Image (spheres, rainbow, N blue to C red):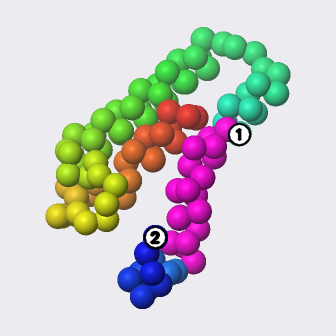
């Protein structure tokens, strides 16, 4: 755990603290996306399957672009990182893995 003096002012902002709460609870936050379709009756049609497959493919493409751009430099648990990835898909979105997950879960 970090001490308050080692945390920057940006990390103490409301949005950063909210982001930290969301990050800590990221494993169960997608659960409503699974529960709602199970509880709400609906009809399956070819167009909805096609749309669903396209969203999953889009999400996985975004995730793969993020992994390809970042490489292994970001796959660590420590906060000691040599450089910030700002090229590739990271020049469009801050965290393409989460954006990709969002589309895949939709």
Name the residue beneath numbered marker 2.
1
Q: Which mark is residue 32?
A: 1
Nearer the observer: mark 1 or 2; the answer is 2
Q: Residue at x 34, y 55 (%)?
A: 77
Q: In the displayed image of the protein, which residue is found farthest to the left?
A: 82
- Viewer-proximal residue among 7 and 43: 7
Counting residues from the start of the chain, the first of labels 1 and 2 encountered is 2
Asked if one can make out residue 88 in the rendered structure from this viewpoint, the answer is no
Within 10 angstroms of label 2, few (less than 14), some, or many (20 or more) residues? few
Does residue 22 sit above or below 52 in this rendering? Answer: below
**Quadrant location, the C terminus:** top right
Q: Residue at x 43, y 75 (%)?
A: 2
Q: Secondary structure at mark 2?
A: loop
Q: Residue at x 29, y 52 (%)?
A: 76
x and y, in percent, of residue 46 in the image: 60, 11
Cα separation, mark 1 vs mark 2, equals 30 Å
Does residue 26 sit above or below 59 in this rendering? Answer: below
Quadrant of residue 61 in the image?
top left
x and y, in percent, of residue 22 in the image: 58, 58
């Amino acid at each position: 755990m970090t001490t308050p003096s080692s945390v920057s002012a940006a990390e103490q902002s409301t949005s950063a603290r909210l982001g930290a709460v969301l990050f800590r609870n990221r494993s169960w936050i997608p659960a409503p996306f699974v529960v709602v379709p199970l509880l709400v009756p609906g009809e399956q049609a070819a167009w909805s399957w096609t749309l669903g497959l396209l969203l999953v493919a889009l999400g996985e493409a975004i995730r793969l672009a993020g992994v390809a751009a970042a490489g292994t430099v970001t796959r660590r648990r420590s906060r000691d990182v040599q450089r910030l990835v700002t090229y590739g898909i990271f020049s469009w979105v801050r965290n393409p893995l989460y954006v990709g997950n969002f589309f895949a879960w939709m």
